[in-house]
Amino acid sequence: MNDLHLSSDGRSSVQSHLDELSRRITAVIILIIILTGIWSFSIDEILNYVLGRLDPCEQSCVNIFSPDEWAGTRWFSAAIIGLLTAMPFAIYQAYSFAKPGLLPSERRAFVVWMFMMWILAFSSLVFTMIEFLPWLYSYGHSFNDETGLIGRYDAAEMLRIAISIAWAIILVLAAMSVVTITGMSKLLWSGNAGWWRLRIHGIMLMLLWLVIPVNLPGLLFTLTLIASGMVELIGWKSFRAPMPIGHGIRELLDFEGGVHRVLYVDCRCCGTSPKISPLRGMGLVEYQALCRDQYQQDDLLDVVKRFNASKVVFSGCSIESMPVDFIDSLRFLGCDTSTLNLARLSVARTDNSDIDYRLAMASQTNPWSEEIATKRCLELLNSSEISTILFGEKIPFGLNLQIDEAWITNPSNSLIEKIEELGIIMKYCSN
């Protein structure tokens, strides 16, 4: 396996995904065409109001010099309003298509971003047409009064420039909101900032250059610098943020100086796994039935990916009971797995002692050294009344522990020697 596989991922071919994408895009386009036709009946009143706001003269100086360009601008304006009206349906189609391939945090960020952009797009279009450009045109027209020139302005050209500037504002807001949302969601940090910069700046500038008229090179150059500068300014902290920390994960060093981030997955295993505290420095996430619930598996993959966990320690879950794709996805993320097998240990004795659970946690190594693990186990045994330790490579079927007995899975030779020095009998067990 060479990719991340979520529980909702299907085994469909690339062509089936392309067919689905084509169907969804076609449905959105048909709706936009229908809405464009509906808005075309009232577009003249809307454009009349907009041009009245854009007109910088006391007596109207806006004219139509090219009827064919005006007709094209009229339909283009109706199409823009139709697109904004169809956005909720387009958002639903986009989310439905992308949802199977997104992690939970990515889904939330995607939904928030799409609805935010719908609101910002409508707001920026209204602000540009009603407030910003009327002020800008009036300011520019004031120079004509000083030079004695008489202004005559092309209505189609004014609207095209207004739409271009509004589109540029929408693109800049879209890029800024992506940086803000991904930064707050801890999806963006200094380790992947280059990858995010390439996508954000690349898509924003490509769409910006596509819509700006070619006869306005000064506007193109100015908007490019302003757009890139504002995105970098908003993302100053996010692009330079350290590796995100969450769920109590701390960086642990092994004896060679390597950095590890260990996550303890406290799964209740449908009530069969007891609860114990993780070691210091371990992160902690809790689930009810990880091996049975695909949504919980996706959530764990999300946590591992966002916080760069290098090792996952399951409480009661058996590695063999997990879906193969789920374990392979953890390995793809560079995350090792191990388990305490607390669910099996919980049925090995009838008393309420938790010594076996605590020994299972204390004997954990990597990144901890064998010496530290041995020290933790000896401290537990010194304060207990255990006289016999049963051990083996894995827990035998039907294991029944007495009050003065305990179990340790696959202990090191040094740990066996230290325990025997305490006067505790070590007894090997296997099926």
Image (cartoon, rainbow, N blue to C red):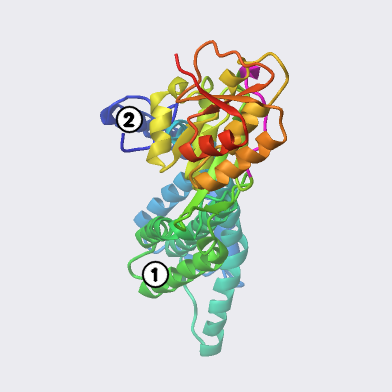
Mark toward the viewer: 2 or 1: 2
Which residue is under mark 2?
17
Disc 2 + disc 1, Cβ < 8 Å: no
Q: Is residue 185 left or right of residue 13?
A: right
Residue 405 position in % (x across, y down): 63, 21
Q: Is residue 10 above or below residue 122?
A: above
Residue at 49% over, 53% down: 254
Q: Secondary structure at mark 1?
A: helix
Mark 2 Cα shell of 10 Å, populated few (<14), some (14-19), many (≥20): few
Residue 325 position in % (x across, y down): 39, 28
Residue 118 position in % (x across, y down): 56, 46
Q: Secondary structure at mark 2?
A: helix
Residue 188 or residue 143, whichever sits in front: 188
Residue 232 or residue 67, whichever sits in front: 232
Q: Residue furthest top?
A: 398
| Amino acid type, callout 2 | His
Q: Is residue 358 above or below residue 154?
A: above
Quarter occupied by residue 97? top left
Q: Residue 220 got which mark? A: 1
Residue at 49% over, 19% down: 429
Q: Is residue 185 above or below residue 96?
A: below
Q: Residue furthest bottom?
A: 147
Residue at 48% over, 41% down: 311
Residue 33 position in % (x across, y down): 42, 36
Q: Quadrant of the N terminus?
A: top left
Which stretch did the figure color magenta?
A: 270-279
Mark 1 Cα shell of 10 Å, populated few (<14), some (14-19), many (≥20): some
Quarter occupied by residue 247? top right
Mark 2 and mark 1: span between their CA atoms?
Answer: 36 Å
| Amino acid type, callout 1 | Leu
